[in-house]
Image: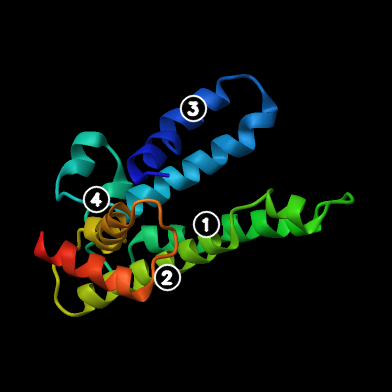
């Protein structure tokens, strides 16, 4: 999924629309949208003033080692994901492991989110401890890697498994551009 599309779908406005649908069965999806929206906000701080105009404290620059977003990321967001994971494993019923796997994020996505949260918090704290007045976190995430591997995929056309030679050739071609 493209990042921009994900941020549009997993957004506060979609959560509100789902909540107003008057269908209790979509409330879990609405909560997931809210959680991901806040996660995106915490990890994509890009301006010193945007939080004022948008009235959103989750997108203000990081300036303190005791920032409440660290607490939210570690003890609300990650706990939410872990509780969801546990609920799928402990859910009553005769479900196959494949069926249970479809009730939660992929293991790679789950682990990736955990790694992203821990590294995000630690990197910002490191910078603040070492004299940075504020931190804008927009470029911390995997934008550069996503761009690079997107170029690799484009060069590889339909090849999902390029050889080392093809990968190296594509790398040189990308470097020239």
Question: For the residue carrying disc 3, how many other residues have a C-alpha within 10 Å: few (<14), some (14-19), or many (20+)?
Answer: some
Tag shown at residue 16? 3
Element assignment for label 1: helix
Q: Which residue, given by chain and number where applicable, does mark 1 sit on?
A: 76
Would you identify the image quadrant in which residue 166 lies?
Answer: bottom left
- Position of 18 with respect to 14 (left or right) is right
Question: For the residue carrying disc 1, how many other residues have a C-alpha within 10 Å: few (<14), some (14-19), or many (20+)?
Answer: some
Q: CA distance from mark 2 to mark 3?
A: 29 Å
**Marks 1 and 4, the one that precedes in the sequence:** 4
Is residue 134 among the parts visible in the rendering?
no
**Marks 2 and 3, the one that precedes in the sequence:** 3
Q: CA distance from mark 1 to mark 3?
A: 20 Å
Q: CA distance from mark 4 to mark 3?
A: 23 Å
Q: Residue furthest bottom?
A: 130
- Position of 164 with respect to 45 (left or right) is right
Q: Residue at x 26, y 73 (%)?
A: 168
Tag shown at residue 118? 2
Q: Mark 1 and 3 residues: CB-CB less than 8 Å, in contact? A: no
On screen, 119 above or below 34?
Answer: below
Q: CA distance from mark 2 to mark 4?
A: 19 Å
Element assignment for label 4: loop
Q: Which residue, given by chain and number where applicable, does mark 4 sit on?
A: 60
Q: Mark 2 and 3 residues: CB-CB less than 8 Å, in contact? A: no
Question: For the residue carrying disc 2, how many other residues have a C-alpha within 10 Å: few (<14), some (14-19), or many (20+)?
Answer: some
């Amino acid at each position: 999924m493209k990042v921009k599309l994900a941020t549009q779908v997993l957004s506060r406005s979609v959560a509100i629309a789902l909540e107003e649908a008057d269908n209790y069965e979509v409330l879990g999806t609405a909560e997931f949208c809210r959680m991901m929206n806040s996660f995106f906000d915490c990890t994509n701080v890009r301006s010193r003033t945007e939080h004022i105009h948008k009235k959103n404290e989750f997108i203000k620059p990081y300036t303190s080692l005791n920032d409440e977003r660290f607490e939210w990321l570690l003890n609300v967001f990650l706990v939410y994901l872990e509780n969801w994971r546990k609920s799928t494993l402990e859910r009553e019923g005769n479900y196959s492991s494949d069926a249970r796997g479809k009730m939660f994020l992929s293991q790679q996505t789950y682990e990736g989110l955990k790694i992203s949260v821990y590294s995000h918090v630690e990197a910002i704290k490191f910078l603040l401890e070492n004299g940075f007045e504020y931190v804008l976190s927009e470029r911390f995430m995997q934008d550069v890697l996503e761009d690079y591997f997107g170029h690799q995929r484009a060069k590889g056309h339909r090849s999902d498994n390029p050889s080392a030679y093809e990968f190296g050739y594509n790398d040189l071609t990308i470097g020239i551009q």
